[in-house]
Image (tube, rainbow, N blue to C red):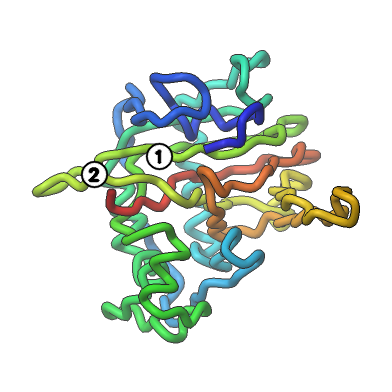
Amino acid sequence: MPPKGKRKDASAANKTGPAGSKGTAQPPKSPPPNWPPLRPLVPASDLSLSTTLPNQIVTIRNFWPASLCKMYVSFLASLPLTTTPGKPKKGDAVRVNDRFQVEDARFAEMLWEETALKGLVVGEEDGFGVGEDDGLALSEEERRELWGGDVVGLNPNIRIYRYKKGQFFDQHYDDFNNVTIPGDPPIQARTTWTLLLYLTSPATGCLGGETVFYPEPPPGKKGKSQPVEPVVVGLEVGMALLHRHGAECMLHEGREVLEGEKWVIRSDLCVRR
């Protein structure tokens, strides 16, 4: 959860209790849309996990091909997006964007099962051609420690973000959620890593909008902290970004979009609880 006194992402929390407290996500009221099929997809053998910052930021470049991203941008633009309020609640970060939120276990399962994401994250070949070649080369125990437990799928709470020129997401922390993944039987889970899938980039005319992380500076001599350079992740069409959230979340922001539109699909990795 966010450190005391720090701003948080209200969309990640959706709490019934006070900011920073444990809670259970409240299902959004929007009916699930008729999502386009996830085709074509990049062959799993051409994908790998890349560590941007150890134990904090992992990316999958070309997770979706440009053609699929373009089709989804067109589809998502038809959804009933709503603009976030200009004045956030106390303790929430300032965010100016258009968004659509829906509880949709079917689409979460599509993202998890029909793509190479499951195989890459859990390290199972399972026909995807991954495992030792997934880019991390971790043991089962190391992988479990990285993700915060046994990953069982994605958060059914799907969020769509559109940032137009002048829109941004101020510095904040992403909280965790306790969620239920439907099934027989249902799985009681907890979110541990944020998943962001970028659909636009400078190649599509979107300038700005980078995701910037601010690592905690290590203690220096006489109690003075040493300055640490921020970690800037630029937009790439079809790139998936995973970053740790909850108690170990880094302060981060979505920079202002200078031109074009930034489109993002958001979910979270879930571990069994």
- Where is residue 43? Give x, y as percent: 42, 76
Residue, x 40% and y 37% (percent of image)? Answer: 177
Instruction: State whether residue 66 appears in this view.
Output: yes
Q: Find disc 2 in the rendering and name its residue.
A: 188
To which quarter of the image does residue 156 belong? top left
Tag 2: amino acid = Gln
- Where is residue 80? Give x, y as percent: 45, 25
Tag 1: amino acid = Ile
Residue, x 52% and y 60% (percent of image)? Answer: 67
How packed is label 2: few (under 14 Cα within 10 Å), some, or many (20 or more)?
some
Q: Find disc 1 in the rendering and name its residue.
A: 158
Question: Does 257 appear above or below 236?
Answer: above
Residue, x 57% and y 36% (percent of image)? Answer: 2
Residue, x 52% and y 72% (percent of image)? Answer: 49
Secondary structure at badge 2 equals strand
- Where is residue 273? Give x, y as percent: 28, 48
Secondary structure at badge 1 equals strand
Viewed as shown, does residue 206 lie left or right of 25? right
- Where is residue 66? Give x, y as percent: 56, 61
Check the image and name the residue furthest to the left.
184
Question: Does 177 appear above or below 184?
Answer: above
Q: How many marks?
A: 2
Viewed as shown, does residue 207 lie left or right of 19? right
User: Could you tell me how far apart the alpha carbons at marks 2 and 1 are, in whole angstroms?
Assistant: 17 Å
**Label 2 or label 1, whichever comes before in sequence order:** 1
To which quarter of the image does residue 181 belong? top left
Question: Does 238 appear above or below 171?
Answer: below
Viewed as shown, does residue 135 lie left or right of 27? right
Tell me, yes or no, whether the two marked residues, 2 and 1, touch with CB atoms within 8 Å: no
The disc placed on residue 273 is none
